Image: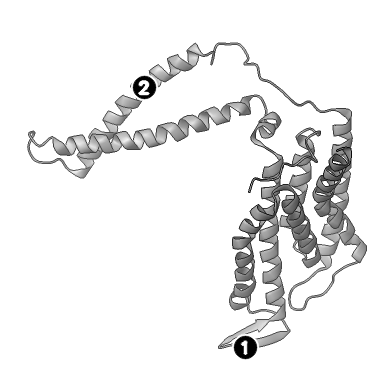
Amino acid sequence: MAVKRTIAFDACHATVPAALFAGAVALAMLAVHPVCVAVSLAGALLFSLLARGGAATARGLAWQLPLLALVCLLNPLFSASGSTLLFKFGPRSVYLESLAYGATMGGLMVAVVLWFEGAAAVLTQDRLLALAPRRARTLPLLLGMAFQLVPQLLGRSREVRATLSACTAAGARSGVCEALTRTSSMLLTWSLEESIERADSMRARGWESGLPRTSYRPERPRPRDMAALAGIAALLIVTATCAWAVCAQWRFYPRMSGLGPWWACVPCALLALLPAAAELAARLRERGRR
């Protein structure tokens, strides 16, 4: 099934969803609190269902949920700490606090993976390039050349070794160090010769011509984008403050205590549910126009 097209952030500059998803990922990774992790997981799952579709989300959960269960069940075996004994498994004691900590960390891992998958559905490659500085846009060229040259170099290394092994008229076969030296020298000569040709080819296409290369910028921040960024920044500050307050009071060991006031988790829930709410509102508006 094809992945559903996201429409909530199409009209925004790429910095708006980038800031929103960066804040959601940071909250999921740093706020180790059962309520914060639960709302982050719920928001990430809801946005994944809207942006990626039920089939793609289910394929991801097919390996994410077993990972959550594995972390939840293995943590009491490796960290037998707590004060509420549930049962004994041979010489091991399973405590409620260890089980809760494992479930929280497993949910945190799944939430982070879901947020990254949701961000990948919104921030496509062209939008990420629009966020990068001008010089950083040469990185795809460098990575493409590396991915091309490394397999080519390995293939030529095997070809050189096979050729040397086939040349038996010169006498006994050389040792390992001598064969390695001869192979390295041949590969170096081969690479230097091709580097000159590759440099001439790139120079003919305008690289290192002394003039700055132009780039097409399809997106420019507008006043409404700056207002959205200001609102997201304010929400992130409030969320970070409230998350720090509730996480500072919470303790897993030796006894779970200090949930904190319920209203301190409201900004966390707003941040986690904001992408899904924006996507749902955009789809309802689009359906109403038809």
Location of residue 158 in the rendering, given as x and y in whole percent from the top left corner: 28, 38
Reply above or below: 40 against 182: below
Mark 2, Cα crowd under 10 Å, few <14 / some 14-19 / many 20+, is few
Location of residue 140 in the rendering, given as x and y in whole percent from the top left corner: 56, 30
Please indicate whether residue 57 sits to the left or right of residue 242 in the image. left
In front of the other: 218 or 280: 280
Q: Which is more N-terminal, label 2 or label 1?
A: 1
Residue under label 2: 194
Mark 1, Cα crowd under 10 Å, few <14 / some 14-19 / many 20+, is few
Q: Which element type, helix, strand or loop, lies under badge 1?
A: strand
Reply above or below: 68 against 222: below
In front of the other: 163 or 8: 8
Name the kind of residue labelled 1 in the image. Lys
> What residue is at 78 percent from the left and 76 percent from the top?
256
Q: Which element type, helix, strand or loop, lies under badge 2?
A: helix
Q: CA distance from mark 1 to mark 2?
A: 67 Å
Residue 130 badge: none
Name the kind of residue labelled 2 in the image. Glu
Quarter holding residue 179: top left
Residue under label 1: 88
Q: How is the image coloured?
A: one colour
Location of residue 249 in the rendering, given as x and y in whole percent from the top left corner: 83, 67
Quarter holding residue 104: bottom right
Quadrant in which the C terminus appears: top right
Quarter holding residue 163: top left
| Any part of residue 110 in sight | yes
Location of residue 271 in the rendering, given as x and y in whole percent from the top left corner: 83, 51
Please indicate whether residue 16 sits to the left or right of residue 165 in the image. right
